[in-house]
Amino acid sequence: MERTLAILKPSCIERSLIGEIINRIEKRGIIIQGMKMIRMTEEMCRAHYSHLVEKPFFPELVKQMTCTPVIVICLAGVEVVRVFREMTGVTNGRNALPGTLRGDFCVSGQMNIVHASDSVENAQAEVARFFSPEELFDYVPENLNFLYGAGEI
Ligand code: IDP
Ligand code: MG
């Protein structure tokens, strides 16, 4: 099984969508192995969004990501990096397909409510950046045999 990182951004917190997003994650059958509320700092934004630090909008991005606490969630499942990324939808909520989190709950490229890791390599680094090993729970849900068929895991 893989792990990936979800962040419920300030635009999710402020719009009272925490329950909606977690509900969708649970209903899909994705396993939650860690979850907490934190306040991101500029330093954390620089590490998390290192590919964007030179962009003109980066100061605005820091402002957006630090204006309220966020909820970070470690998700687990077979191919969960791709599954959750596709479930999140493309960056700009106005282009995201209906049925995706961004396509159903936002209309912005900036206030796009959820972060999803974009590759297995980045997912591993992001989970390790936001969670210590003691904060992650590698438990086996009772319904695992109904989430996946024989040989899928
Ligand atoms: P992603 O969140 O879909 O992976 P990235 O390109 O990694 O997209 O960008 C990270 C975040 O930075 C986006 O989710 C969005 O909040 C913000 N962002 C991306 N492009 C722009 C832009 O052109 N203007 C302002 N904010 C942006
Ligand atoms: Mg990204």
Image (cartoon, helix red, strand yellow):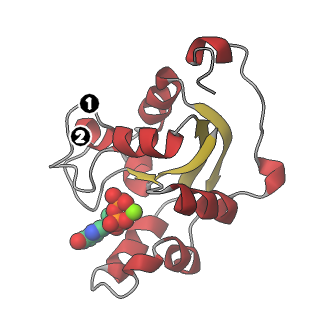
Q: Looking at mark 1, is its residue's CB closer than 8 Å to ligand 1?
A: no
Q: Please indicate, yes or no, whether residue 55 appears anywhere in the rendered image.
A: yes
Which residue is depicted at the point 62% across and 20% down?
151
Relative side of 7 to 104, left or right? right
Q: Quadrant of the C terminus?
A: top right
Helix, strand or loop status at disc 2: helix
Helix, strand or loop status at disc 1: loop
Which residue is depicted at the point 69% across and 61% down?
128
- Residue carrying label 2: 103
Whole-number angstrom distance, CA of label 2 to CA of label 1: 6 Å
- Whether residue 106 is situated above or below residue 58 in the rendered picture: above
* Residue 90, image x, y percentages: 26, 51
Relative side of 2 to 67, left or right? right
Where residue 126 sits, quadrant-wise, is bottom right
Which residue is farthest left? Answer: 94
* Residue 31, image x, y percentages: 61, 31
At label 1, which amino acid type do we have? Gly
- Residue carrying label 1: 99
Q: Quadrant of the N terminus?
A: top right
* Residue 81, image x, y percentages: 49, 46
Residue contact at pointers 2 and 1, CB within 8 angstroms: yes
Q: Please indicate, yes or no, whether residue 74 appears anywhere in the rendered image.
A: no
- Whether residue 47 is situated above or below residue 68 in the rendered picture: below
